[in-house]
Image: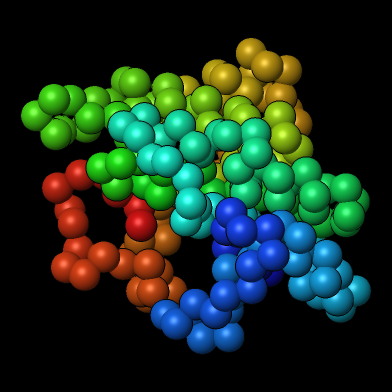
Amino acid sequence: MFMYPIFITDDPAARVEIPSLPGQCRWGVERLEDFIGPLVQKGLRSVILFGVPLKCEKDARGTPADDPQGPVILAIKKLRALFPTLFVATDVCLCEYTSHGHCGVLHEDGTINANPSAERIAEVALAYAQAGAHCVAPSDMMDGRIKAIKRKLIDAGLGNKCLLMSYSAKFASGLYGPFRCSPPIYSFPRCS
Ligand SMILES: [Zn+2]
């Protein structure tokens, strides 16, 4: 049942330690074979990918989130090709890709605009599913995004091929500690 969170960054050769997660690294796509291969040999069956873009140009709608050349989509394709039995899930999140740092599209006054936010999150989820993800996992708490994602998957013929897992409950867990903002920001839906 173990699902290993993998942090994928946009330097293909990266292997950079993450100080808040001792022993864990941000990985580049070209490093995945050597890193994941031995773990699959030991019995690892599932991973969940988190994009950590460091070089992309962020904008108000989080355009880089579903860039076909972005690290998450490249990693999905790479892992599927290398390890056919590995279950590949992806975090679905706009926070790291938006210029304002929130997990959605904003009104002019800075509050969340819910409908276009759910639509944008669904677009990103569909791109990950089309790249080969077995599971898309939105971690925000945007009203209506599960419906929007499911609709997109069904309309694309992937409704019964890609699982949809909402896991915002992680916010209540001590395991989420390393991701927490300091101080926490509660005024907007935000998941990292
Ligand atoms: Zn987010």
Residue depicted at x 24% and y 25%? 113
Q: How many numbered marks are there?
A: 0
- Above or below residue 35? Residue 86 is above
Residue extending farthest to the top is 155
Res. 169 visible in picture: yes
Residue extending farthest to the bottom is 22
Left or right of 179 in this view: 28: right
- Above or below residue 181? Residue 85 is above
Residue depicted at x 39% and y 74%? 178
Residue depicted at x 65% and y 34%? 68
The foreground one among 68 and 1 is 68
Q: Tell me residue 21's x, y (percent).
A: 48, 80
Res. 6 visible in picture: no
Q: Quadrant of the N terminus?
A: bottom right
The foreground one among 142 and 37 is 37
Residue depicted at x 42% and y 61%? 170
The foreground one among 18 and 47 is 18
Residue extending farthest to the left is 109
Q: Tell me residue 132's x, y (percent).
A: 75, 38
Left or right of 54 in this view: 46: right
- Above or below residue 10? Residue 122 is above
Residue 59 quadrant = top left
Q: Tell me residue 7's x, y (percent).
A: 58, 63
Left or right of 65 in this view: 84: right
Q: Tell me residue 122's x, y (percent).
A: 50, 27
- Above or below residue 131? Residue 119 is above
Q: Quadrant of the C terminus?
A: bottom left
